[in-house]
Amino acid sequence: MATTAAAAVLFFSVVLILASPLVAASASAAGQAQELLLSFRASLKDTSGALSTWSPSTPYCNWSHITCTGGGAVSVALSLQGLGLSGDIAAEPLCRVPGLVALSLASNSFNQTVPLQLSRCASLVSLNLSSAAFWGPLPDQLAMLASLTSLDLSGNDIEGQVPPGLAALRGLEVLDLGAPRLSGVLHPALFRNLTRLHFLDLSNNQFLESELPPELGEMGGLRWLFLQGSGFTSAIPETLLQLEQLEFLDLSMNGLTGALPPAFGHNFRKLLSLDLSQNGFSGPFPKEIDKCVMLQRFQVQGNGFTGELPAGLWSLPDLRVIRAENNRFSGRLPELPTGVSRLEQVQVDNNSFSGGIPQSIGLVRTMYRFSASLNQLNGSLPASLCDSPAMSIINVSRNSLSGAIPEFRNCKRLVSLSLSGNALTGSIPASLGGPPVLADIHVSSNGLTGAIPAELQSLKLALLNVSPSTHLTGRVPPSLVSGALPAVFLEGNPGLCGAGLRNDGCDAPPLRNHQGLALAATVAALATGVTLLAVGALAVCRRLHGDTSSSSSSSNSKLVLFHPIKITGDELLAALRRDKNVIGRGPFGETYLIELQDGQRVAVKRLISSGKQTFRAVKNEMKILAKIRHRNIAKMLGFCYRHADGEVSVIHEHLRMGSLHDLIRAPKFTLGWNDRLRIAIGVAQGLVYLHHDYAPRLLHRDLKSSNVLLGDELEPKVTGFGVDRVVGEEAYRASLRSDLNYGCYIAPEVSCTKKPTHLMDVYSFGVILLELITGRPAEQPASDGSVDIVRWVWRRANVADGAAQILDAGISRTAQQGMRAALELALRCTSVMPDQRPAMDEVVRSLQLLYPPHPSPSPAPFTGVALGP
Ligand SMILES: *[C@@H]1O[C@H](CO)[C@@H](O)[C@H](O)[C@H]1NC(C)=O
Ligand SMILES: *[C@@H]1O[C@H](CO)[C@@H](O)[C@H](O)[C@H]1NC(C)=O
Ligand SMILES: *[C@@H]1O[C@H](CO)[C@@H](O)[C@H](O)[C@H]1NC(C)=O
Ligand SMILES: *[C@@H]1O[C@H](CO)[C@@H](O)[C@H](O)[C@H]1NC(C)=O
Ligand SMILES: *[C@@H]1O[C@H](CO)[C@@H](O)[C@H](O)[C@H]1NC(C)=O
Ligand SMILES: *[C@@H]1O[C@H](CO)[C@@H](O)[C@H](O)[C@H]1NC(C)=O
Ligand SMILES: *[C@@H]1O[C@H](CO)[C@@H](O)[C@H](O)[C@H]1NC(C)=O
């Protein structure tokens, strides 16, 4: 009744954003270039249809991934990175395209040798073949590309010598040969002739056998020099000190030896990052380092340096990181200039430092990590040690510290505190239960006495190691023992008692009265919080329903489609009114599954609290999302905007198999390990695309198994990202806080960090990986009281052979090794400390190593609708 009437009142303007056919009035040269490009495309396998807009009816300068510049003589740049391309590159027609100046084939999967014919692309200025699965030798012929200023072959499996002929490319400014398997000795001409270079990367070529050549000093314009992990031997040549323009110098993980030249640092006025770690350097560190006034990172760990760290280093105005662990440095740690210092990280473990911990460490506002374990530090712990609002990690274990553990009242961000192996006395302060994300406390091997405070029960992952401490007494707070805390971490404290311990009856009353009350009060407060939120959610639902059925006549909407799907505004509205179409509920509103007339299914996500964004702003964001093409990313098909209240409904492709969440929740989740691994790899690849390859770079921010759709042959597609861009940051954050159901996918630092990071997505991915490994839904209540799969797993991961309890018992034993490796990766991804999580591209590489060599995942057929007029 009201249904059709209401729909009719709504005014829909349908905008199809599609390339309209054009009569190409092109000059014959352009026509020829067009044909050459089309025959180049014909040689490629383009499974995601990224190049499907290349059509003879539009001028090639309008094709996607092609940029033309200049008026008369057009310069053409092809940017084909990250499109999932493979096939046998037809370089011959490509090189005949007039004015081809830039070619990027990076981040694809060509699985072939570098095409020799690329050397005919005579006008090329920039050639980027990085991470595109090229193998075999580095062809000499590339030396014919005389105009080249930038050559990137990094991340491939290139092997053999670096052809000395490349020295002919005298105009080269960027040369990136990182991570291949180059071998042999580098020809000195490469260094002598390439005097224009400002970026040189020869890193991770462990088969290179080269001394650092004195000719390095000739490359006076070098700003970035990356030679890490490449088998360089010898001492640092004196000539290196001439490179006055250096900003990044990384010589880590080589076989470099000897003392540094005494003037080291003197000329490096522009140096931002110095990494000499993991070599065999010895002797004192030159004082001239204090001339590096712009230095931000100082990394010399894992050498044999002796003497004091130069005093001037500690007060460099921009310095963020000092890593000097595993050396033989001695002397005192100096006080820092607290108002000025921007230090974030000081790691000096395993040296011979003596004296006290500087009072100023905790007063540097940026300080995030201080670790100085395994030294000879003495005196007491400064009460201000944790006063920096960023302080997250403190490790001063195995020193000679004495006195009591201070109250540490200001720790907001503390995650890990290691005080074990000192001579601390007194009791464990109750205030250690305060820091909201504290996960890890090590206080064993001290002279501590007294009880374990009940307040510690509130710690998120509750890993308290007090074994052995020998003088602790009293009842262990019950939730600390139930699975959370392996009893071994309490051993060696005969005075402790409680369930599960050798001494399980306690004579003393369980809790002192006021503690009991405090605890009860907390529980009550929590419970009210929950009910309040539930009521809030209900109210929102009512309002929503009220809106749709009354559909005031003033409201009008706009439907924008990026793909020609068969839906009208009326149908969309009608479908959104049927409850049976609801397939999920999120913090912003329901998600509906709609079957179109032609049988295609789409998912429509309503964002009811998107209030403030204008249609223009929403459309701009949507366009960005709509351009994403990746086989592991679900396509955004269009959206509907309601002017009256700014409500946005986003239309996505939907896949027949439903979501990973549905699959895991099904009564019997019996997927084999290889399939699970393939799903994980696909999801990870989708994220890599968002994080690294798509421009602008995107964060997902709401990754969970219900946002992973499964296509044919279980090829996963990630959906549900970009909501933050559509509704705005403020509304997004507010809703995140209210989404109790999916809290376990959210990284712990989210609540106390202003800026979202890709490491938060890595955490969410880790949770999905845990679901695949355990076969458990992320939010399923467990017998030990934990709801959150991360807690459930971490508790078991901390006990001997906990893995056996964690891995899905339904999976055959032959897969165990791979599952254990995946578990290790998932634990890193879900680390409470963001900086310990791997980046998604590393995750993909690690997972791919676990995938059996032959049955390679067959790409899902391209499911998109072809674009037509
Ligand atoms: C091609 O691009 C130009 C400049 O951006 C534009 O004016 C023209 O309309 C486009 N042609 C087609 C067919 O899209
Ligand atoms: C690369 O191609 C070879 C055959 O030429 C094939 O055996 C191999 O599996 C392919 N590698 C990948 C990663 O596709
Ligand atoms: C080559 O392409 C990759 C992927 O797009 C990019 O990360 C890299 O910076 C490019 N290399 C150069 C030298 O521009
Ligand atoms: C290095 O440059 C000189 C000219 O300055 C040239 O004669 C020589 O051939 C170049 N070396 C190589 C290996 O190309
Ligand atoms: C301490 O550093 C030395 C190198 O200086 C290294 O050999 C040793 O293994 C390190 N000890 C620990 C416990 O890491
Ligand atoms: C603290 O330092 C000790 C000694 O170097 C080390 O064994 C331990 O793993 C560190 N603890 C943490 C949590 O990093
Ligand atoms: C710390 O050790 C030094 C010797 O290394 C000693 O002179 C000093 O008195 C000690 N300080 C304390 C507080 O024990």
Image (cartoon, rainbow, N blue to C red):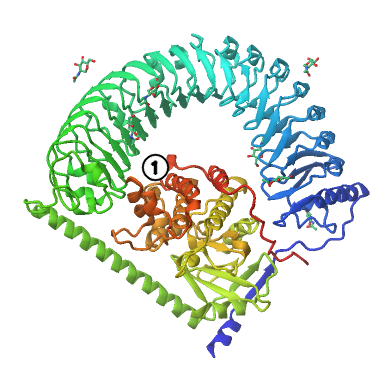
Judge whether 708 appears above or below 183 on screen.
below
- In the displayed structure image, the side of residue 53 where residue 704 appears, left or right: left
- In the displayed structure image, the side of residue 552 where residue 776 appears, left or right: left
- Which image quarter holds the C terminus? bottom right
Where residue 82 appears, as percent x and y from the top left, is 66, 47
Q: Identify which residue, 617 or 752, lies in the foreground.
A: 752
- Which image quarter holds the N terminus? bottom right
- In the displayed structure image, the side of residue 536 where residue 356 appears, left or right: left
The answer to which quarter of the image holds residue 160 is top right
Q: Residue furthest right?
A: 28
For residue 291, say whether it is visible: no
Where residue 559 appears, as percent x and y from the top left, is 62, 70
Judge whether 591 appears above or below 858 on screen.
below
Estimate how packed mark 1 is, as few (under 14), some (14 to 19) or many (20 or more) residues with alpha carbons within 10 Å: many
For residue 29, say whether it is visible: yes
SS category of the residue bearing label 1: loop
Residue ID at (56%, 70%): 604
Where residue 556 appears, as percent x and y from the top left, is 57, 75
Report the amino acid beneath label 1: Met
Where residue 145 appears, as percent x and y from the top left, is 80, 30
Q: Residue furthest bottom?
A: 1
Residue pointed to by mark 1: 833
Residue ID at (36%, 14%): 308
Residue ID at (83%, 43%): 94
The answer to which quarter of the image holds residue 210 is top right
Number of numbered discs: 1
- In the displayed structure image, the side of residue 194 where residue 225 appears, left or right: left
Judge whether 573 appears above or below 613 on screen.
below
